[in-house]
Amino acid sequence: MFKLASIRDIAREAGVSPGTVSRVLNDDKTLSVSPKTRNRILTITEQLKYHKVERKNKRIQIITYASKEREMTDPYYREIRLAIEKEIKRLNLSLKRTLRIDGTNKLENISQIEKAGAIIVIGKFSSDTLQTLHGYNNNMVVINNPETPKNIDAVYSDLGDAMYQLLEKVKAQNVTQVTYVGGVKTTRDLTGTPTFCNNDPRYMSYQQWCRHHDITEDAYIVGWDKEHGQQVIKDLVKQSNLPEVLIAGNDMLAIGMMQQLSAEKISVPEQVQLISFNDLDILQYVSPSVSSVHIAIDEFGRSAVKMAEERIHNIRSVAHHIVVEAQLIERETFHA
């Protein structure tokens, strides 16, 4: 039976160590070896018809636009990152250090992402930024950005459609007083510099629904933090303008709203109903339990890592966009 030559075979013929052979074949510039020895190793390698086995780089690098501080105040992006890390560990892949493009930590050496087997990008970066990153490493998957260019793999939920379906369930209860609370959409460029735009899909879908049903719009576009939710409730109470249903664009807003409603002695759901978006684990500490549109973060992680692995192993070359359904989880604060 024909036996393929190994590094040990070459080392034995050349009278050097296997480590020296390996370093010569990998063109290690730090190796101190005479030109004669180097040439002898290369000649024997050719004579023995040695073929180097290319090892697949299975290291995945996460790039996120959420700072560590942001991950603390709003766990949404932290949970996405942890879902990716969990799946990488399950598949016995390896993880490079997470890069943050958040406006404070610029990506000074962008070329380092070339060395990753694949990169997974979290957050709403501009299309130009995504194309630039893709130019450095085309084994790339983007999470949570429906505006990802079609030539780049992506996984996300259609929050606009989820909002419209939710509002239709609300209307089925003969409810017409619906207030939406949210923030603006933020996209970042390669330096982390933010661009703000008032076209978040949840808000745009709310506006469309109001127009379609000839319902007066009542929206507070104030921000995404708990404190913003608290302030909106204070304003509504002061104006004696409490609606039948409150919809919070994320869970942190909902938590702030619940805290302030409790402080104002307003009972939920008896006096006002409340619905949130994201359905993070942190909601389990809120009472009464909050109904929320569930974003399947674990599925984001599984799908993104699977697509990254497919790219690493050259299983496919055509980009896929996976849309993960977002479903309302009914709890105490709202029942359809």
Image (tube, rainbow, N blue to C red):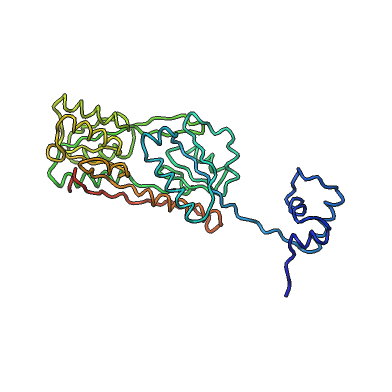
Q: Is residue 313 left or right of residue 290?
A: right
Q: Is residue 24 left or right of residue 100?
A: right
Question: Where's the N terminus, which quadrant?
Answer: bottom right
286 and 237: which one is in front?
286
Q: Pick out the residue farthest to the right.
A: 36
Q: Can you give x and y, in whole percent of width and height, for residue 193 in the image?
A: 47, 29
Q: How many marks?
A: 0
Q: Residue at x 40, y 49 (%)?
A: 300
Q: Residue at x 36, y 34 (%)?
A: 73
Against 187, residue 313 (above or below) is: below
Against 37, residue 179 (above or below) is: above
269 and 113: which one is in front?
269
128 and 313: which one is in front?
313
Image quadrant where residue 218 sits: top left
Q: Residue at x 83, y 61 (%)?
A: 13
Against 23, residue 136 (above or below) is: above
Q: Can you give x and y, in whole percent of width and height, for residue 220 in the image?
A: 25, 30
Image quadrant where residue 205 sits: top left
Q: Is residue 48 visible?
A: yes
Image quadrant where residue 147 sits: top left
Q: Can you give x and y, in whole percent of width and height, for residue 125 in the image?
A: 45, 37
Q: Is residue 236 left or right of residue 58?
A: left
Q: Pick out the residue farthest to the top.
A: 238
Q: Is residue 146 visible?
A: no
Q: Can you give x and y, in whole percent of width and height, for residue 90 in the image?
A: 47, 55
